[in-house]
Image (cartoon, rainbow, N blue to C red):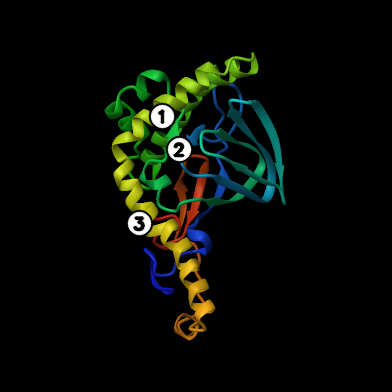
């Protein structure tokens, strides 16, 4: 049992979530659509809160292909295993809420690269990496990996639209196999992040029940933050990130 004021992060965001702001890419892909790099998450649910503009999100899951319009006020979220692709319409802006902060940055997100990349961890890593956080060279690399992800995505979408979910399931299996060597590190991140945050709530409930809430209530305070990095090259688009450990920075 953790103490009521203990967690893996000093002061985590509510629920141990990750948070960033995204402006969807306006790069046109091979199918004429402007937007981000299709990908899935293995253990994290991701949510889009649309704050401005309009666009769409394309999703692939075993129950079918969907093209969901997005506009200010829309809320959409994707369970682990759902391939999602942000599509630019006009000045689409989104706040992203990410379950299990730290895990997406640790490799939980897998691009829909063609099968030969998923079968070769070194080849996948080279295609997914950016040479720098920002700048022309990094932007060119982000565009290349987006196009490669779309190349692998389009056959999955075509098959699913025709009623054949097996190519998508094969991609899910390949993605799961690709990340298996990282699972021990992921468990550590989960235990010291999202799990510790939830356990702290349990410890607070125990303290309340015992009539001993003074300890953690006396340590309460407020926090503020503003984005510390602008124009980051994320999977879906350009990211505004917070310099808070576990929010959008790796823990």
* Residue contact at pointers 1 and 2, CB within 8 angstroms: yes
Residue that appears at 39% across and 73% down? 3
Q: Which residue is mark 2?
A: 42
Residue that appears at 35% across and 56% down? 251
* Residue contact at pointers 3 and 1, CB within 8 angstroms: no
> Which of the 4 quarters of the picture holds residue 243?
bottom left
Give the quarter of the figure containing the N terminus: bottom left
Residue that appears at 49% across and 67% down? 202
In this rendered view, identify the residue nearer to me: 147 or 245.
Answer: 245
Where is residue 11 shown, x and y percent of the image?
43, 69
What kind of element bears circle 1? helix
What kind of element bears circle 3? loop
Q: Residue furthest front?
A: 210
Where is residue 30 shown, x and y percent of the image?
54, 21
Q: Which mark identifies residue 165?
A: none
Quick check: 175 above or below 198?
above
In this rendered view, identify the residue nearer to me: 113 or 147.
Answer: 113
- Residue 113 is left or right of residue 96, and the answer is left
Q: CA distance from mark 2 to mark 3?
A: 18 Å
Where is residue 83 shown, x and y percent of the image?
54, 32
Q: Which residue is mark 1?
A: 175
Q: Which residue is mark 3?
A: 251
Q: Residues within 10 Å of mark 2 (few under 14, many from 20)?
A: some
In this rendered view, identify the residue nearer to me: 37 or 158.
Answer: 158
The numbered mark, 2 or 3, whose residue comes first in the sequence reads 2
* Residue contact at pointers 2 and 3, CB within 8 angstroms: no
In this rendered view, identify the residue nearer to me: 159 or 62.
Answer: 62
The numbered mark, 1 or 2, whose residue comes first in the sequence reads 2
Q: Residues within 10 Å of mark 1 (few under 14, many from 20)?
A: many
């Amino acid at each position: 049992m953790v103490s009521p004021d203990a967690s893996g992060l000093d002061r985590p965001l509510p629920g141990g979530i990750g948070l960033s702001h995204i402006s969807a890419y306006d790069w046109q892909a091979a199918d004429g659509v402007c937007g981000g790099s299709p990908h899935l998450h293995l253990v994290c649910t991701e949510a889009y809160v649309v704050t401005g503009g309009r666009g769409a999100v394309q999703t692939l899951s075993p129950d079918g292909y969907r093209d969901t319009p997005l506009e200010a006020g829309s809320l959409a979220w994707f369970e682990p295993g759902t391939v999602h692709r942000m599509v630019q319409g006009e000045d689409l802006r989104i706040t992203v809420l990410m379950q299990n902060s730290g895990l997406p940055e640790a490799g939980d997100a897998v691009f829909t690269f063609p099968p030969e990349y998923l079968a070769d961890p070194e080849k996948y890593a080279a295609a997914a990496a950016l040479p720098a956080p920002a700048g022309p060279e990094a932007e060119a690399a982000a565009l290349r990996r987006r196009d490669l992800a779309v190349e692998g995505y389009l056959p999955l979408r075509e098959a699913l639209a025709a009623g054949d979910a097996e190519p998508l399931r094969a991609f899910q299996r390949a993605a799961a196999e690709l990340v298996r060597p990282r699972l021990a590190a992921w468990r550590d991140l989960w235990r010291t992040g999202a799990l510790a945050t939830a356990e702290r709530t349990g410890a607070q409930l125990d303290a309340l029940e015992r009539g001993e809430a003074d300890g953690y209530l006396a340590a309460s305070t407020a926090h503020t933050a503003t984005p510390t990095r602008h124009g980051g090259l994320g999977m879906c688009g350009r990211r505004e990130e917070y310099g808070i450990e576990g929010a959008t920075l790796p823990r």
